[in-house]
Image (spheres, grey):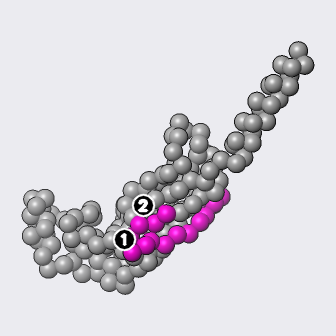
């Protein structure tokens, strides 16, 4: 009986240590400039270096901020943010903060944030979390956007 109690205690201890020392999450994504101001990525899309983003988590009930960490995009418009804790039931989003391009700095409503699950209590085994790409609108659309949008059978009047 004593061996059983020791065995159970060791199992519980190893589980608690594994949980306490789990790997951080890696949140990955990209920021882009919607050069045609059409609300989605096109062949003319430019990925933005030096853009600032943040991961923020809020309590699901009170909406109070529980966690925040900042990140910056690299030369390919990609960000990699380490989140060093499990955020449990909190609601977590990656949010655009500032564009790296002054000619493309209007956050695209609906594409200005991306929801990410930052908990291990959801069946996902990977430490990597991929956020949807987020975009800024160009201050002025490119001259050849009409041709680009014809690929999608859209004209200027439809977007």
Q: Farthest top residue? A: 1
Magenta stretch, main secondary structure class: strand
Residue appearing at x 39%, y 75% in the figure? 75
Residue 136 in percent (x, y) is at: 35, 72
**Residue tagged by mark 1?**
76
The quadrant of the rendering that contains the C terminus is: bottom left
State whether residue 115 is above or below residue 7: below
Does label 1 or label 2 sit earlier along the sequence? Answer: 2
Q: Residue at x 58, y 46 (%)?
A: 119
Q: Nearer the viewer, mark 1 or mark 2?
A: 1
Residue 85 placement, left or right of 112: right
The answer, for residue 60, to whether it is visible in the render is: no
Q: Which residue is mark 2?
A: 29
- Magenta residues span 64-80
Where residue 148 sits, quadrant-wise, is bottom left
Q: In the shown orientation, is residue 73 left or right of residue 17?
A: left
Residue at (88% x, 15% y) in the render: 1
Q: Position of residue 127 (x, y in %)?
A: 54, 49
């Amino acid at each position: 009986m004593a061996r059983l109690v020791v065995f159970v205690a060791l199992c519980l201890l190893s589980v608690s240590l594994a949980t306490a020392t789990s790997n951080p999450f890696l949140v990955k994504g990209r920021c882009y400039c919607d050069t045609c101001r059409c609300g989605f990525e096109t062949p003319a899309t430019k990925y933005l270096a030096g853009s600032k983003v943040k991961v923020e988590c809020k309590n699901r009930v009170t909406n109070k901020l529980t966690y925040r960490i900042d990140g910056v995009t690299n030369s390919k418009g990609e960000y990699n943010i380490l989140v060093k804790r499990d955020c449990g039931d909190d609601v977590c989003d990656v949010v655009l903060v500032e564009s790296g391009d002054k000619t493309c700095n209007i956050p695209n409503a609906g594409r200005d944030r991306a929801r990410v699950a930052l908990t291990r209590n959801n069946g996902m085994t990977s430490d990597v979390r991929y956020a949807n790409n987020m975009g800024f609108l160009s201050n002025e659309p490119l001259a050849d956007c009409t041709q680009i949008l014809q690929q999608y059978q859209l004209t200027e009047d439809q977007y």
